[in-house]
Amino acid sequence: MAEPFLKVQGVSKIFGGLAAVNDVSFEMEAGQILGLIGPNGAGKTTLFNVISGYYTPSHGKVFFKGRDVSGKPPYALAALGIGRTFQVVKPFGGLSVLENIIIASFLKHPRRHHAEEAAWGVLEFTGLADRAHIPAASLTLAGRKRLEIGKALALEPSFLLLDEVVAGLNPTETDRTIEVILKLKSQGMTLLVVEHIMRVIMGISDRLLVLNFGQMIAEGSPAEVAANPSVIQAYLGEDHE
């Protein structure tokens, strides 16, 4: 039987005696979009950081394509094919949009010419080609969010973790970002997505994973999760009827 694309096995992350993530296990198949949801403080970003190598799990393991990658640093995971975005976008403001992408492209394309050629492809894909030569600092929030996706794509990952890439965007920009995500999936990309906007995450995800107080309380299709009493209580409180 083939190994899962991603396997998270009994992962916990403890800070000062507090378990921000507590014994979480799940698997992903290639080509899926898995949505990771939960109330504020549920442990989503902590789990995200464990999977992407920014934290070493206190307990448990993370396997990527059958390989134990638990605690490997982000640059090593990037070389293996794992890319991620950050919730708080911080481009190299004094560099151009193109230069921001080129820096990431150097991972797979050490020669400047090849890195720039690859970067132009990313700019075309993300709709930023017409802003290639302006300083990244002059982009709107929507532009900076798309540049964040572009920098991750320039690593040429097979697995992409997206952290609230539509937060703060207007409906038009949100829809444009959804188009980019679905286009990535159509090209075979596997994605783990953290998002608070329910219409977005419900609309793009094949499956959802729900965390509350660091523990997994539900997993299933968007319809199954939306009807789960534990999920309703976690989001709306015990008095909800």
Image (spheres, helix red, strand yellow):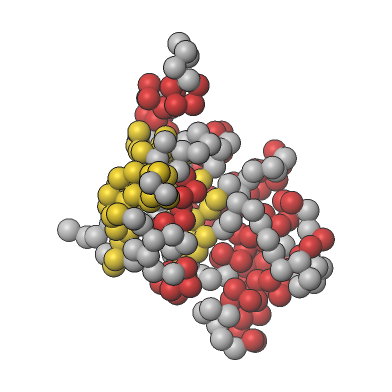
Q: Relative to the observer, which residue lies in front, 222 or 214?
A: 214
Whole-percent x, y for residue 199 in the image: 56, 33
Residue furthest top in the image: 241
Q: Is residue 241 above or below residue 170?
A: above
Position of the N terminus, as image quadrant, is bottom left
Residue 20, visible in the rendered structure: yes
- The answer to whether 104 appears left or right of 224 in the picture is right
- Up-down relation of residue 166 to residue 1 (above or below): above
Question: Taking 11 as reference, is 71 above or below it?
Answer: below
Could you say which is closer to the camera, residue 133 or residue 52? 52
**How many numbered discs sit on the rendered protein?**
0
Residue 140: percent from left, percent from top: 78, 53
For this view, does 156 lie left or right of residue 56?
Answer: right
Residue 221: percent from left, percent from top: 38, 35
Residue at the extreme front:
16
Q: Is residue 186 visible?
A: no
Q: Kindly give the residue lying farthest to the left in the view shown.
A: 1
Quarter of the image where one finds residue 99 = bottom right
Q: Residue at x 66, y 57 (%)?
A: 89
From the viewer's perspective, is 93 left or right of 25? Answer: right
Q: Residue at x 38, y 51 (%)?
A: 13
Residue in view at x 38 percent, y 21 percent:
229
Residue 195: image location, x then y, percent: 54, 42
Question: In the image shown, does 67 or 133 lie closer to the viewer?
Answer: 67
- In which quadrant will I find the C terminus? top left
Q: Nearer the viewer, residue 128 or 160?
A: 160
